Image (cartoon, rainbow, N blue to C red):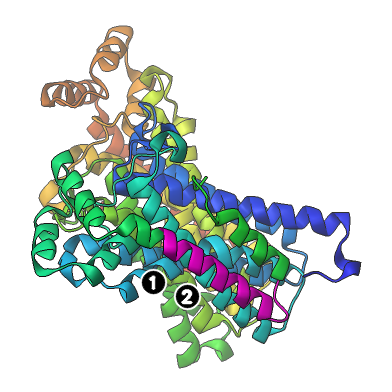
Amino acid sequence: MAPKAALTEANRALSIFLGWCLEVFHGLYIILDDIIDESSTRRGKPCWYTLDDIRMTAINDSLLLQANIYDVLKRKFSSMQCYGDLKEVFDKSLLITSVGVHMDLSTMHQDVLTFTMKQFRQMAKKKTAEYSIYTPIELGLVLIDATNLQSLQIAKNILYEIGIFLQIQDDFLDCYGDPAITGKVGTDIQDKKCTWLVATFLERANTAQKKTLKEFYGKKHEQSVQTVKQLYEDVGLPEIYKTYEDTAYKKIKEDIQQAKGIPQRLCHNLMDKFYKRNVYGGGKKNRCQIVVDAFEELAPQAALTEANRALSAFLGWCLEVFHGMYIIMDDIMDASTTRRRKPCWYKLDDVQMTAINDGLLLQGIVYEVLKKKFGSMQNYGSLTEVFHRNLLFSTIGENMDLATMHQDVLTFTMEQVRHIAAYKTAHHSFYTPTELAFNLTGNTNLQILEQAKNILYEIGIFFQVQDDFLDCYGDPAVTGKEGTDIQDKKCTWLVATFLERANAAQKKTLKESYGKKDEKSVQIVKQLYTDVGLPEIYKTYEEATYKRIKEDIQQAKGIPQRLCQNLMDKLYKRKF
């Protein structure tokens, strides 16, 4: 669809970069989808999360993939006019696809006899068609700066039909495909999915057949699966599918031929490729408050209107929702049981691993709110970049944190503790809210922001050291969660400080017990900490660091001093 003059080698290379970004985006969904569905193989190989040295750290790996996409987009397209629109396409795709996955997962709580073809088509549009078929075309159109919205809408309608066609084929292959060819064992019947097969069956089955379906659909054992497959055979589903595939193929091809201004050759090629295919290759709300307080202190008096104050609150809310995503994912990866004195979200019987998609849905909602509230403002692009950069830094920090489980505990260092805390905690919880407020004010003095960054990072590291101490010595009735850093072999301030003071015998005992799940090992490690005087060392550290950072704040010029001072006063000697 690009004009001849735009078909340069440079532009072709950019289109390849966009395609690569979308494939990486797809990798994110594959990783998470396999966890949610408890799949064992993908494309003939073990699923990523099933590998012994990966497990639930796969969740952070998927977010790291997403963060790298935004980083590549910035590097390759930030100087181009279409940069903001390209980011929006990915943000929108995240939201719509997550909604589709949510609709798909919700069927496990629905009476199978209420499944309808309309419901199936709605899910297929959001989960498959938007993301796998329409989004690649939209990216191509944005790259060539196409502005013919009517052509785009016509293309969207046809591409959605192609996407639904693709999903129906997937449903059929899940039930009747050869795992040696498809690369995965089908589980739609066991997972009680609302598929084209079951919706078509319900349109043709008699009362007795529906009763049998209800009894066996969604059951895990093989006999139930075979009973459902026999029901499908009894109403002639394999033959109905063949008729559907031929008819739908011809109809969509005719629609493509008649439509004007759309990428006809591409649409025809897609249909030819898919036709007859055999394989389809309650917290503290600190962050919110920091945004509001930082804006109040940094904005010029004329900008402190009620409307702008409301916008700062919206930004703070977005960051809290973003943080909610991290909490959901972090609890799964750490196998936590409680959060804020309540069961973790994924521990609820009607949620479990669908919590992963809930986390992505929260992230998608943030981008949608940003577009609605800030889309017409000059700083909209920079605000979305703050969230994208936050995703990259936080997932790198989480990756560094999770990697310690494969590291010899005796090699942990204080420098490593500070690096993890800077990426995982300081950037996300202290610098990002201030950066959002700074962007909202329209201030372009980056020197002030850099000065503030150095101090906010120190505050964030101070906060993480407190968290490490409370994980070991805090009261779960007050902190709201059971500490697991010792069991999870985390590189904390406590263990790094211990290693700086312990003798050879104590280090040997630490190595034998650190990272073990049993209570006896945990108590041995805590006794080692007591033996070198860690509780007293921590008190001295907290006092000295509090005073030092307060002095640094006092001496820095142009930064939100009142905010930083208040943060330190709020954190000092905290118990949760």
Q: Which mark is residue 335?
A: none
In this view of the protein, can residue 513 be seen by the observer? Answer: yes
Identify the residue at horizontal 44%, vertical 47% (top origin): 30
Q: As rendered, which of 352 and 544 lies closer to the eye?
A: 352
Q: Is residue 50 left or right of residue 393?
A: left
Alpha carbon separation for disc pair 2 and 1: 23 Å
Q: Which residue is mark 2?
A: 368
Say if 185 sits above or below 4 in the image: above
Q: Is residue 191 left or right of residue 324?
A: left
Outermost residue to the top: 505
Decide whether residue 235 is among the magenta residues: no
The rendered magenta stretch, by its main secondary structure, is classed as helix
Q: Please tell me which of labels 2 and 1 falls first in the chain.
A: 1
Give residue 35's position: percent from left, percent from top. 33, 44
Q: As rendered, which of 298 and 310 lies closer to the eye?
A: 310
Q: Which residue is mark 1?
A: 121
Identify the residue at horizontal 61%, vertical 70% (top origin): 253
Q: As rendered, which of 193 and 231 lies closer to the eye?
A: 231
Outermost residue to the right: 5
What range is drawn magenta here? 242-263
Identify the residue at horizontal 34%, vertical 63% (top origin): 196
Decide whether residue 252 is among the magenta residues: yes
Give residue 12's position: percent from left, percent from top. 80, 56
In this view of the protein, can residue 384 be seen by the observer? Answer: no
Q: How many marks?
A: 2
Q: Residues within 10 Å of mark 2 (few under 14, many from 20)?
A: some
Type of the residue with mark 1: Arg
Type of the residue with mark 2: Glu
Secondary structure type for disc 1: helix
Q: Is residue 58 left or right of residue 342?
A: right
Q: As rendered, which of 468 and 323 lies closer to the eye?
A: 323
Identify the residue at horizontal 45%, vertical 85% (top origin): 309
